[in-house]
Image (cartoon, helix red, strand yellow):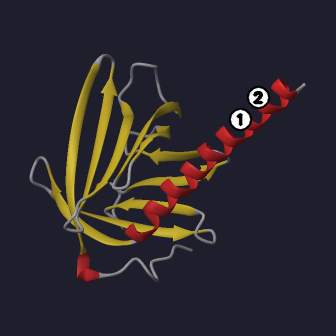
Amino acid sequence: MSTLLATLMLAAMSAMGVEQSAVQAFDQLKPLAGKWQGQTDGGHTIRIDYALTSRDSVFVESWQPGTSAATLSIIHRDGDRLLATHYCGQGNQPRLALQHAEENRLAFEFVDATNLATATASHLHRLEFIVKSDGSLERIETYRSGDEEEVSRVELRRLNDESGAGSRGP
């Protein structure tokens, strides 16, 4: 009987640790709320807005707001997981789950997708956020098409030296 109780306690503690990890990872995103601008690998200047909404339980990433090329990513907790859904300009919606978290780095990996034409069609497969010591943000995305992967990086700087406070969505 005591072995069963010990096993159940360890399982509960393990589950609490995973949930705490999702909470801590989500808390790492909150200070990023605000307007950012940066350069892509290809030298294009882009703007990304980050906002908190739904009583600070959802983190919203908007690329090039106000244009038809805008994309959107939504990050939120789902119990003991941290999930990201990317509403892509390709018309599909990959879902990714947090797989790796460090003090300054979060990495999400592909789980599944809606509106993906085939399993080998191009889609966001990995998404990473790295906060650098100088306050800049590196956003790395990996797209997969068949067996091929394409990695792109964006180095972002906060516009107008805004703090994330007050950057709230609807």
Report if the CB atoms under discs 1 and 2 are less than 8 Å apart. Answer: yes
- In this rendering, position of residue 3 left or right of residue 47: right
* Element type where label 2 sits in the image: helix
From the viewer's perspective, is residue 28 above or below residue 3? below
Circle 1 sits on which residue? 10
- In this rendering, position of residue 83 left or right of residue 160: right
Give, as a three-letter code, the residue at label 1. Leu
In the current view of this chain or complex, which residue is farthest to the right?
Answer: 1
Residue 124 locus on image (x, y percent): 38, 36
Determine the residue positioned at 57% across, 56% down. 23
Circle 2 sits on which residue? 7
Residue 48 locus on image (x, y percent): 31, 63
* Element type where label 1 sits in the image: helix
Residue 132 locus on image (x, y percent): 23, 60
Give, as a three-letter code, the residue at label 2. Thr
User: Where is the N terminus found, in terms of image quarters?
Assistant: top right
Determine the residue positioned at 9% across, 53% down. 43
Looking at the rendered structure, which numbered label has been put on residue 84?
none
Q: Quadrant of residue 133?
A: bottom left
Determine the residue positioned at 36% across, 80% down. 163
Choose between 123 and 161: the one closer to the eye: 161
User: Where is the C terminus found, in terms of image quarters?
Assistant: bottom right
Label 1 – label 2 distance at C-alpha:
5 Å
Choose between 97 and 8: the one closer to the eye: 8
How many marks do you count on the picture?
A: 2
In the current view of this chain or complex, which residue is farthest to the top?
Answer: 147
In the current view of this chain or complex, which residue is farthest to the front?
Answer: 2
From the viewer's perspective, is residue 41 above or below residue 39? above
Choose between 66 and 43: the one closer to the eye: 43
Q: Quadrant of residue 121?
A: top left
From the viewer's perspective, is residue 139 above or below residue 37? above
